[in-house]
Amino acid sequence: MNTLAPLTESEVKQFVDDWYSKLDVHAPVEEFLPMLANKNLEMRFPEGTLHSLDEFKTWYDRVTHTFFDEVHTMQVLDITPASDQANVQLVVRWEARQWYPPAPKSERLDFNAAQRWVVKRSPDTQKPIIVTYIVDSLTPQKGSASL
C-alpha cells in the first residue's frame, strides 16, 4: 500500500501563497487545475458553490473578466496539519476594481474574506490540492463599492 507523506505547515503556506499570487496576475486557468481536487471538490463562494473543474473554469473566466488590478494580502493564516490533510483558516484582504459599462469610471473593491480550506496531498502529483474552499464572510472595508 502506498501511503502519502503528511503535509507540512510550510508546504501548505507556500501553496496558499502560490494560489493568491496566481489570482493576482490572472494566471491561465490551466495553472489552477492541478491545485484542485478532481473528485469531491467543494468551493463555496458568495455567488454559488462549485463541485468540478469545469465549474471552476467557468467561474474563473467570469471573475477574470469582471475584476482587475487585484491584490490579495494575507491578514491571518492558521494552518493545522492533521494526518492526511491540513485545515486552513485564513483572512485575506482582497482589493480590486470593477467596471460596468457604460459607467464613466471603475469602482474600487476592498474586502476582508474569511475562508476555510481543506488541503490534501494529491495521490497523482504528490503536491497539495484544495478539496474544500469555503468563503465564510466578505467584510467590506471603508470606501469599498458593493459587489
Image (cartoon, rainbow, N blue to C red):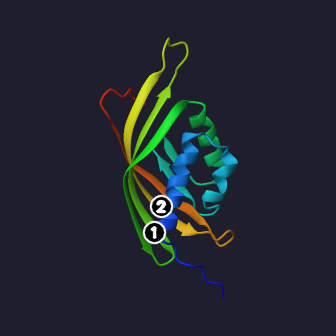
Neighbourhood count class around disc 2 (C-alpha, 10 Å): few under 14, some 14–19, many 20 upward: some
Q: In what quadrant of the picture does the N terminus appear?
A: bottom right
Left or right: where 1 falls relative to 116: right
Number of the label disc, if any, that sits on residue 42: none
Residue 131 location, quadrant: bottom right
Q: Can the viewer see residue 46 in this picture?
A: no
Q: Amino acid at mark 1?
A: Glu
Assess whether mark 2 and mark 1 are in contact (beta carbons under 8 angstroms): yes
Q: Name the residue at 58% across, 54% down.
A: 51
Percent coordinates x, y for residue 59 in the rendering: 59, 42
Q: Name the residue at 66% across, 46% down.
A: 29
Percent coordinates x, y for residue 91 in the rendering: 37, 50
Residue that label 2 marks: 13
Distance from disc 1 to disc 2, alpha carbons, whole Å, reads 6 Å
Q: Name the residue at 55% across, 16% down.
A: 101
Q: In terms of depth relative to the viewer, which is nearer, 134 or 65? A: 65
Neighbourhood count class around disc 1 (C-alpha, 10 Å): few under 14, some 14–19, many 20 upward: some
Percent coordinates x, y for residue 133 in the rendering: 49, 55
Q: In what quadrant of the picture does the C terminus appear?
A: top left
Q: Secondary structure at mark 2?
A: helix
Left or right: where 77 falls relative to 10: left
Q: Secondary structure at mark 1?
A: helix
